[in-house]
Amino acid sequence: QSVLTQPPSVSGAPGQRVTISCTGSSSNIGAGFDVHWYQLLPGTAPKLLIYGSNHRPSGVPDRFSGSKSGTSASLAITGLQAEDEADYYCQSYDSNLSAPYVFGTGTKVTVL
Amino acid sequence: QVQLQESGPGLVKPSQTLSLTCTVSGGSIRSGAYYWNWIRQLPGKGLEWIGYIHYSGSTYYNPSLESRLTISVDTSKNQFSLKLSSVTAADTAVYYCAGGLTPYYFDYWGQGTLVTVSS
């Protein structure tokens, strides 16, 4: 089971803002390790959306933003669009685990 | 822009070896300081990091799989590979290859390939 917990699902109407939380602990996010976010769409390559907790790779719309505080992180999507309907995963590093590259439980975003 | 593509059998029999290859295009597998990873998604579950090989040749494996796992690089073909031996149904998953300039996150991903372990 994952050490990073996300809500199973979030939803919003087009144009709205949604946020996805990623809750960790003192051995990962709380220890200062960065959080990264990925978008998974069926049949396509997963896409890095946010790295280093709040940095967007080139080409990622500024509708996507990331933040981190304490033992948690969040991904916000503003101006929600139909094409944003996908699964989203957070990822970090855990200093207590021998397999330290850990992913969240995943969140399905539904555009109503 | 680096692109990755997985290839290999979609069906493997129990106790046999699962072998997958990831072809890297848009750049040399030897360039930069890339970490070349394998990640899998078990059915109905989240993502699990399997291991990586650094362009220097060093490897780091998930201890839960280490005894069965080999990740290697073929620079002549610009590919890296995964071999997982003695597979069981629990190894059925979508397998992704991914690359990154640091080991801490994954810049580039392949689209994934479903491998089913069944007789």
Image (cartoon, coloured by chain):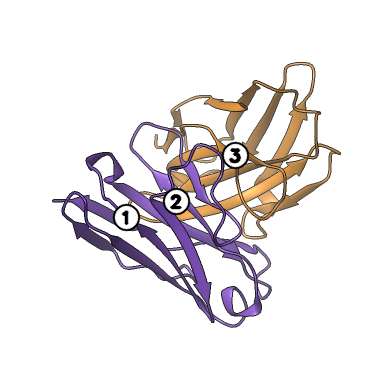
Q: Is residue A38 left or right of residue B36?
A: left
Q: Secondary structure at mark 1?
A: loop
- Give the x, y percent position of residue A106: 38, 59
**Mark positioned earlier in the residue sequence (3 or 2):** 2
Can you tell which mark lies on residue B98? Answer: 3
Are the residues under marks 1 and 3 on the same chain?
no
User: Furthest residue to the left?
Assistant: A112
Q: Which mark is residue B90?
A: 2
Pointer 2 local density, CA inside 10 Å: few below 14, some 14–19, many at least 20: few
Residue B98 spot, x, y in % from top left? 59, 39
Residue type at mark 2? Ala
x, y percent for residue A112: 13, 51
According to the colouring, which chain is orange? Answer: B
- Residue B86 at least partly seen: no
**Label 3 CA crowd tier, 10 Å (few <14, some 14–19, many 20+):** many
Determine the image quadrant of residue A65.
bottom left
Q: Colour of chain A?
A: purple
The amino acid beneath tag 1 is: Thr
* Mark in the foreground, 2 or 1: 1
- Residue B18: which quarter of the image? top right
SS at circle 3: strand
Cα gap from disc 1 to disc 3, whole angstroms: 28 Å
Q: Is residue A17 left or right of residue A53?
A: left
Which label was assigned to residue A78?
A: 1
The answer to whether marks 3 and 2 sit on the same chain is yes
